[in-house]
């Protein structure tokens, strides 16, 4: 028997997907129902996270009425959505950003799941995908906002409803839009030039570097002033359960602590009430809350603390390097593209820090957090210059490699 000359055989690797094979997507619920149900689940998750502290405190003090626990949970939920809260007779106008970020993540997961129920043709264009994103995200936003509009008057007063609903709108918007976009494979920079498509990862590199630098500042302060932290802790005279409650309360403010440390690292510093100020090289400490983590604040700052600004510069350089790598710009293009990445990283950090300003009481404990408008100046301008230097550094290294006959850096 003669072999058929028109037949050809190919051998595929075991780890190679079949050509043209589509990844199956299973639809369990209509997407509007999925968006509504999962967003309500996200709202419940935010409530459960807000209940963690009051429930632990309730376990420690068994005589506390359940109604008090419900009220404390409601006030914590309000604070997480930007409304002023009253806890233990103290005005709290400083958002527990740990709970807020959990709510954002829950809304993102809800939108992603709902978007996964919307089966689009694989060849759907960008406009169709973004219309679908708008529909899913809009349903999630409407559901969460209505839930907040119902919940806020139940747990709060008339002066808290407006800020809480506005905050809830912001929380779900921050989560639902990227969640739906990921679920529907909608890419905002799909049709952008190659250099612009690198902007998200460049800004992410800048923000990641700022976060690491802020963590280094906060950890250094904590280690250096650990005896005073322990002294404040001992002065509170709480038992093991009380210590656990206090630790959990400080953990929900961990993002706030990092943003505070970042403001100091960038040179803008912090306001510590009407009379308190903390900037590199200068400290004016007034009354502070009896919370252990505040014991880590320095009482003396020297000019050597200005060295922390190098970490902010490094973050801008990192953003500029990532922005320019893998592209072939001119020297001028490398400079301004890197500057855009650095400035955007600083602007996003400063915008986030705006939500780390607030009150932990009245009078001496009012107005705590990063200094504005100083932070805008210290975050955007220097990081833009550093980003430009990072972009130019890429071309400089590339020129040296070319002179030595080495391969260019990977993208």
Image (spheres, rainbow, N blue to C red):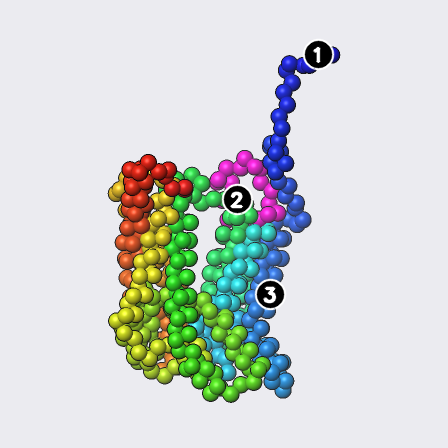
Which residue was labeled with disc 3?
Answer: 44
Q: Mark 1 falls on what kind of element?
A: loop
Q: Residue sitting at 67 percent across and 14 percent down?
A: 4
The tag earlier along the polypeptide, 2 or 1, is 1
Position of residue 209 measured from the top left corner of the image (x, y, whole percent): 39, 58
The tag earlier along the polypeptide, 3 or 1, is 1
Q: Mark 2 falls on what kind of element?
A: loop
Q: Main secondary structure of the magenta part?
A: helix
Choose between 255 and 411: the one closer to the eye: 411
Q: Residues within 10 Å of mark 3 (few under 14, many from 20)?
A: some
The tag earlier along the polypeptide, 2 or 3, is 3
In the picture provided, is 375 more to the left or to the right than 66? left
Query: Where is residue 122, by image quadrant?
Result: top right
Position of residue 74 measured from the top left corner of the image (x, y, whole percent): 55, 74
Which residue was labeled with disc 1?
Answer: 2
For the residues labelled 2 and 1, the Cα–Cα distance comes to 49 Å
Q: Mark 3 falls on what kind of element?
A: helix
Q: Residue sitting at 33 percent across and 53 percent down?
A: 317
For the residues labelled 2 and 3, the Cα–Cα distance comes to 27 Å
Choose between 21 and 107: the one closer to the eye: 21
Q: Residue sitting at 25 percent across and 43 percent down?
A: 332
Q: Which residues are magenta?
A: 115-140
> Is residue 309 among what the camera can see?
yes
Q: Residues within 10 Å of mark 1 (few under 14, many from 20)?
A: few
Which residue was labeled with disc 2?
Answer: 185
Q: Which mark is residue 63?
A: none
């Amino acid at each position: 028997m003669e072999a058929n000359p028109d037949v050809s055989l190919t051998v595929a690797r075991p780890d190679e997907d079949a050509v043209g094979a589509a990844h199956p997507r299973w639809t369990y619920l209509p997407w509007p129902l999925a968006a509504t149900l999962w967003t309500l689940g996200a709202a419940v998750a935010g409530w459960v996270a807000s209940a963690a502290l009051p429930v632990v405190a309730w376990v420690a003090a068994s005589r506390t009425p359940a109604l008090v626990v419900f009220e404390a949970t409601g006030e914590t939920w309000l604070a997480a959505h930007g409304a002023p809260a009253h806890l233990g007779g103290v005005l709290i106008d400083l958002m527990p950003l740990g709970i807020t970020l959990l709510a954002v993540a829950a809304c993102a997961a809800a939108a992603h799941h709902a978007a996964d129920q919307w089966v689009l043709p694989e060849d759907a264009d960008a406009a169709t995908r973004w219309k679908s994103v708008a529909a899913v995200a809009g349903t999630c936003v409407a559901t969460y906002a209505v839930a907040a509009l119902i919940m806020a008057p139940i747990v709060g007063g008339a002066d808290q409803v407006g800020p809480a609903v506005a905050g809830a709108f912001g929380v779900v918007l921050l989560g639902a839009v990227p969640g739906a976009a990921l679920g529907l494979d909608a890419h905002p920079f799909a049709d952008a030039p190659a250099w612009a498509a690198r902007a998200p990862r460049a800004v992410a590199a800048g923000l990641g570097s700022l976060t690491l630098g802020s963590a280094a500042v906060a950890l250094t302060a904590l280690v250096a002033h650990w005896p005073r932290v322990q002294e404040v802790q001992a002065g509170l005279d709480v038992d093991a359960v009380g210590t656990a409650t206090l630790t959990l309360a400080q953990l929900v403010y961990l993002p706030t602590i990092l943003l505070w440390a970042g403001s100091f690292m960038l040179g803008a510093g912090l306001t510590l009430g009407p009379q308190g100020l903390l900037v590199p090289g200068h400290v004016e400490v007034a009354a502070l809350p009896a919370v252990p983590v505040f014991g880590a604040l320095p009482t003396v700052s020297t000019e050597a603390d200005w060295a922390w600004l190098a970490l902010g510069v490094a973050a801008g350089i990192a953003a500029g390097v990532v922005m320019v790598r893998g592209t072939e710009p001119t020297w001028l293009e490398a400079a301004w593209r890197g500057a855009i990445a650095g400035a955007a990283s600083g602007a996003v950090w400063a915008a986030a820090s705006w939500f780390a300003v607030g009150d932990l009481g009245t009078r001496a404990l009012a107005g705590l957090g990063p200094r504005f408008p100083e932070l805008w100046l210290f975050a955007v301008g220097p990081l833009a210059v550093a980003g430009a230097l990072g972009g130019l550094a890429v071309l400089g290294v590339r020129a040296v490699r070319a002179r030595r006959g080495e391969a260019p850096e990977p993208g």
